[in-house]
Image (cartoon, grey):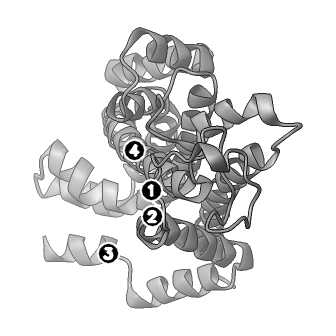
Amino acid sequence: MTTLTVSQAPSRWWKSRVMRRFLSHRLALLGLLMISLLALACVIGPYLLPYDSLHIDLRARFAPPLTGDHYLGTDPLGRDLAARLFMAGRISLLVGFFAMVLSICVGTLIGVIAGYRGGWISVVLMRTVDGFLSYPTIFLLLALAAALKPSPVMITVIIAVTSWMEVARIVEAEVRSLKEREFVLAGRMLGLGRSHIMFREILPNAMGPIIVAATLTVARAILLEAYISFLGFGIQPPLPSWGNMLNGAQQYLATAPWLAIIPGAAITIAVSSFNFIGDGLRDALDVRNDNI
């Protein structure tokens, strides 16, 4: 038993090589820095501003950025745009993160079972995945959002329901390639159960692609939340999100463009940052780079 655990656990040397490759990826480091600063601003920013996100000052309507205490300007009701941006960032980032966790858990479970068991179980599970993938994701997303009460929790679940299929395919392919490896065959010879082999022996060795998929899923979830909120089916005012901030700004593009530019820039920074991190992790965890 001890031999199996040691044989499948990454060595310190391997970990150091992975870390060195990731740290040499400039875009990944830039993405990590940007998302860290953005998350930090969303967490502590509202406490440093003189106004909260619901404070209305009709005399300051449509104030441009850098006007008095309104560092990013105000919206049509005179609410501070910086306060609303940071509060919206909390919601959008949390929705993206928890939607990623749910979709990764569901996709990983289905992928591991389908990849290891094979046979009719794999056929049924993967044809189910194909069925979900064949239906346009955005239509499924909008249909669920329109049919259910659009709270942050419900939007998170809806996005997760429409995002697990790609993870399942990635994990299934990885598990199929691992289940004939020596440590798996040794586990079978020792009489280990299927669940033990799947989740204690194979799954830790498949974590590389899962981690990469997780970072990309966060980016996709943030974008989907912004998309459905922009269309009016997502997070509802007065609760702010980056998507409904864009929705409220579209009629003022000519007269107050900062209302759309600022939340749009936040979405772009968040999505690009997670994509950069995902690219860096993919390159760092690629075993074909071991000779670097």
Q: Which residue is mark 2?
A: 46
| Res 37 label | none
Separation (CA) of disc 1 from disc 4:
35 Å
| Res 52 label | 1
x and y percentages locating residue 209 in the rendered image: 51, 55
Q: Is residue 63 above or below residue 253?
A: below
For badge 1, the amino acid type reads Asp
Is mark 1 in CB contact (under 8 Å) with mark 2?
yes
For badge 4, the amino acid type reads Ile
Q: Earlier in the sequence, mark 2 or mark 4?
A: 2
Mark in front: 1 vs 2: 1
For badge 2, the amino acid type reads Pro
SS class of the residue under badge 1?
A: loop
Q: Residues within 10 Å of mark 2 (few under 14, many from 20)?
A: some
Q: Earlier in the sequence, mark 3 or mark 2?
A: 3
For badge 3, the amino acid type reads Ala
Is mark 2 in CB contact (under 8 Å) with mark 4?
no
Separation (CA) of disc 1 from disc 3:
49 Å
Separation (CA) of disc 3 from disc 4:
22 Å
Q: Which residue is mark 3?
A: 9
Q: Residues within 10 Å of mark 1 (few under 14, many from 20)?
A: some
Q: Nearer the viewer, residue 186 or 80?
A: 80
x and y percentages locating residue 273 in the rendered image: 64, 63
- Asked whether residue 158 appears in the rendered view, the answer is yes
